[in-house]
Amino acid sequence: MTVLPEAGDWRSRLPWSEADTHKHARGRLAVVSGPAHRTGAARLAARAALRIGAGLVRVMASPAAIPVLAASLEAVMVEPFDGADDLGHRLREVDAVVIGPAAGMGEETVGNLHALARTGAVLVVDADALSVFESHPDDLFALLDRDDVLTPHGGEFVRLFPDLADLPSTEAAAQASVRADAVVLLKGHETVIAAPDGRVAVNPNGSPWLATAGTGDVLAGMIGGLAAQHMDSFDAACAAAWIHAEAARRFGPGLIAEDLPDLIPGILAGLAPKDLRPS
Ligand SMILES: NC(=O)C1=CN([C@@H]2O[C@H](COP(=O)(O)OP(=O)(O)OC[C@H]3O[C@@H](n4cnc5c(N)ncnc54)[C@H](O)[C@@H]3O)[C@@H](O)[C@H]2O)[C@@H](O)CC1
Ligand SMILES: Nc1ncnc2c1ncn2[C@@H]1O[C@H](COP(=O)(O)OP(=O)(O)O)[C@@H](O)[C@H]1O
């Protein structure tokens, strides 16, 4: 296990636009929404993904949720789907997918994840899409590729890895990543990111202002947005964790999850190569 200082060298590997790029080439992300009364989490994730540079972001939802979503999204597109097979078919050309925030704890979420696993997109699996596998975590791990990312908070981590929960968080995340054969980002005041090849990083700039509802949904969207731009998933998780916390640090007291996406551009501007910085 190599614990990298300063969360590794992701800064030099952030994705930046080429002169001749177009929105599809900049990265296509989908976020799977919950039902009509639980769409906020998907909207937070989707907006964060656009702000971190994904070129095209879609929120996928049941027909009943579409009017709610359409009334509250502009650049993010909204698309209905009819069951897991239809979801997988519609997302066959997407680069990354976020599933889990407010998705629901039923078989529908399990079926959707199965369908998404067949698309080849990078999956960012969060919240309900983790917890729904509490009684059979190996079924989740069997669906994952090495570039997929699990983003549990402490409660979700215990549900999937009960025997690892008492280990120091770096060791816990490292072992979880090997077991799941996917990247694991274990959220907390010191967020740990681990990859199955042995890379482990501790995010150095955690901010307690993030302890407010919905910030994890934003983080999932940020990771998905970077992964959609073909950033390595471990680097994407490290970069998103740092930028997320930096946004909270800059905002300070009173932060709510809705504030985070709009703070991303200012932080990216400071990380961009000189010729891409705003004048
Ligand atoms: N605006 C929205 O629509 C929001 C929707 N959300 C969704 O609401 C659902 C429930 O999410 P929650 O995370 O509240 O609930 P969980 O279903 O994960 O359960 C929370 C329980 O886990 C325990 N727990 C233990 N360690 C914890 C830790 N480190 N962090 C948080 N809880 C811990 C808590 O004590 C609590 O009893 C998810 O689907 C989530 O995506 C939330 O993300 C908040 C915002
Ligand atoms: N005390 C804290 N210090 C630093 N970061 C925190 C603290 N508490 C929570 N966070 C961060 O806030 C986010 C919360 O995510 P999560 O628990 O999934 O919330 P939600 O489900 O409401 O979106 C994570 O990125 C986590 O690392």
Image (spheres, helix red, strand yellow):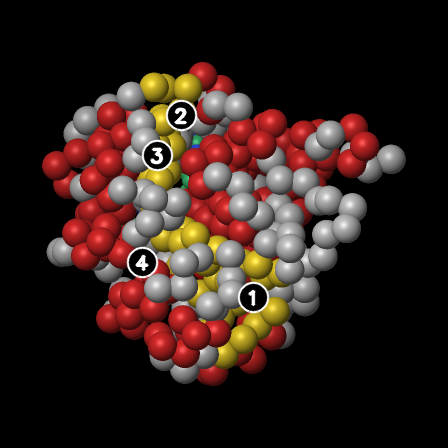
- Residues at marks 4 and 3, CA–CA distance in whole angstroms: 20 Å
**Is disc 3 placed on a helix, strand or loop?**
loop
Q: First in sequence: mark 2 or mark 1?
A: 1
Few, some or many C-alpha atoms within 10 Å of disc 2 (few <14, some 14-19, many ≥20)? Answer: many
| Location of residue 175 (image quadrant) | top left
Q: Position of residue 41 (x, y in %)?
A: 47, 59
| Location of residue 168 (image quadrant) | top left
- Residues at marks 3 and 1, CA–CA distance in whole angstroms: 27 Å
Residue position marked by numbered label 2 in the rendering: 201
- The disc placed on residue 172 is none
Residue position marked by numbered label 1 in the rendering: 58
Q: Amino acid at mark 1?
A: Arg
| Location of residue 149 (image quadrant) | top left
Q: Is residue 124 left or right of residue 131?
A: right
Residue position marked by numbered label 3 in the rendering: 195
3 or 151: nearer the viewer = 3
- Residues at marks 2 and 3, CA–CA distance in whole angstroms: 9 Å
Q: Nearer the viewer, mark 4 or mark 3?
A: 3
Few, some or many C-alpha atoms within 10 Å of disc 1 (few <14, some 14-19, many ≥20)? Answer: many
Residue 212 visible (yes or no): no
**Is disc 4 placed on a helix, strand or loop?**
helix
Residue 164 visible (yes or no): yes
195 or 66: nearer the viewer = 195
